[in-house]
Every structure is written in C-alpha cells, then in structure tokens.
Image: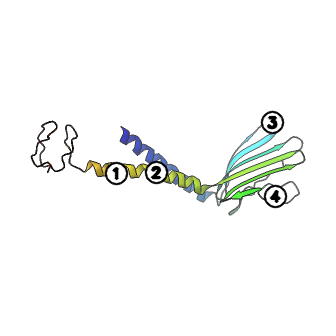
Amino acid sequence: MRRRLFNLAAAVSLLLCLAIIGQWIRSYWFTDAWMWDTLTSRRSIATIGGAICYIRSEETKGQMRFMDKPGFYSTPTIVPVGGTPIPPDWTFAGFKATHVVVGSWRGFTFAVPFWPVVVLTAVAALGLLSGHSGHRRRSQEPVCNRCGYNLTGNISGICPECGTPVAGRR
C-alpha cells in the first residue's frame, strides 16, 4: 500500500512539474489571467512573461488605472492613465514587487518566476522516484516468499526462519 502511495505521489508530482513547464513556456506568448472583482478593487493571478503574478488594484473614485502589458519577457506593469510605466520597487532573482499610490488609486503586483516552482516539483518527483528505485534494489535480494527472511548466503535450500523449502535460490 505504501509503495502505491509513493508511486501515485511521484506520478502526480511529475505531471505537475510537466504542466508547470508547459505553462512557463506558454506565458512568454500568451497571458492567462484569473480575475475577480470586489466593490473597490480588482485582483488577479496571471502568468506573464515567465512569471506567476498576483495583481491588486484599488480605486475609491473614478476609473481603475491598472493595465498589464503582456509581451515577450515582460511582467505586469503599473501604468497610471496618461503616465509612464512604473518600475518594480523590489526585485531579486526574478521575484518582483511593486506598490504604488497615486491619489485615491493604489496598485500592487508581486511576481514569482516559474523556475523555483519547477525546481520544487522536480525535486519532489525525483526524490520519490529515487526512493522507489532503492526499493527495487532491495527486492532483488533473495528472500523467503513466506516470511520475507533474507536468504543471502543460504545454500541449504530451506529457510532457516520458517522451514519453507526455497527452490532455485542460492
């Protein structure tokens, strides 16, 4: 039962890793976004230019002044209406954060690159698969079919633990 759970976890982790790699590649050409609105804000999660982005814009009066400008190797950009793009406040290894207040409007973006997500899912899949391969090595050792006793070095042909005859094992 435990082996089946490890196999299932490894398969799910590997499929998740492959799906994330596919979305990573897709994000350079297409922007996928999931948006939801409240009374005063718009929030979304988007894949843009090799990053997973959380975007929030809040407006108390008038129109929202947020645009995400997808393009090759781009990330969401806060652009006040009639203004110039605002660069990120913080950036590190592909992670980016921007927080802007313009009058009654507030905008926030946080971008996480795909590479750490891919590394985590790949490590999980490889860790589970390597544990499984170790199980295969152990199962190739000669053991008694009835009690599981290790028969390495046994030349009598009888399991010393339970007395079952073991055919063809040496």
The alpha-carbon separation of the residues under discs 1 and 4 comes to: 52 Å
> Looking at this view, is 10 or 36 the one in front?
10
Residue drawn 33% across the image and 48% down it? 135
Asked if the residue under mark 4 is in contact with the one under mark 1, i.e. CB atoms within 8 Å, the reply is no
User: Which mark sits nearer the N-terminus, 2 or 1?
Assistant: 2
Please state which amino acid type lies under the numbered disc 2. Answer: Ala
Task: Say which element carries label 4.
Answer: loop
Q: Where is residue 128 in the image (x, y as percent from the top left)?
A: 42, 48
Mark 1 — residue?
Answer: 134
Residue drawn 71% across the image and 51% down it? 110
- Say few, some or many: other residues with alpha carbon within 10 Å of mark 2 (under 14 / 14 to 19 / 20 or more): many
Mark 2 — residue?
Answer: 125
Residue drawn 16% across the image and 50% down it? 153
User: Which of the two marks, 3 or 1, is nearer to us in this view?
Assistant: 1
The alpha-carbon separation of the residues under discs 2 and 1 comes to: 14 Å
User: Which mark sits nearer the N-terminus, 1 or 4?
Assistant: 4
Task: Say which element carries label 2.
Answer: helix
Question: Which circle marks residue 86 in the picture?
Answer: 4
Please state which amino acid type lies under the numbered disc 3. Answer: Leu
Among all residues in the image, which is located at the extreme left? 156
User: Which mark sits nearer the N-terminus, 3 or 1?
Assistant: 3
- Say few, some or many: other residues with alpha carbon within 10 Å of mark 4 (under 14 / 14 to 19 / 20 or more): few
User: Which of the two marks, 1 or 4, is nearer to us in this view?
Assistant: 1
Mark 3 — residue?
Answer: 39
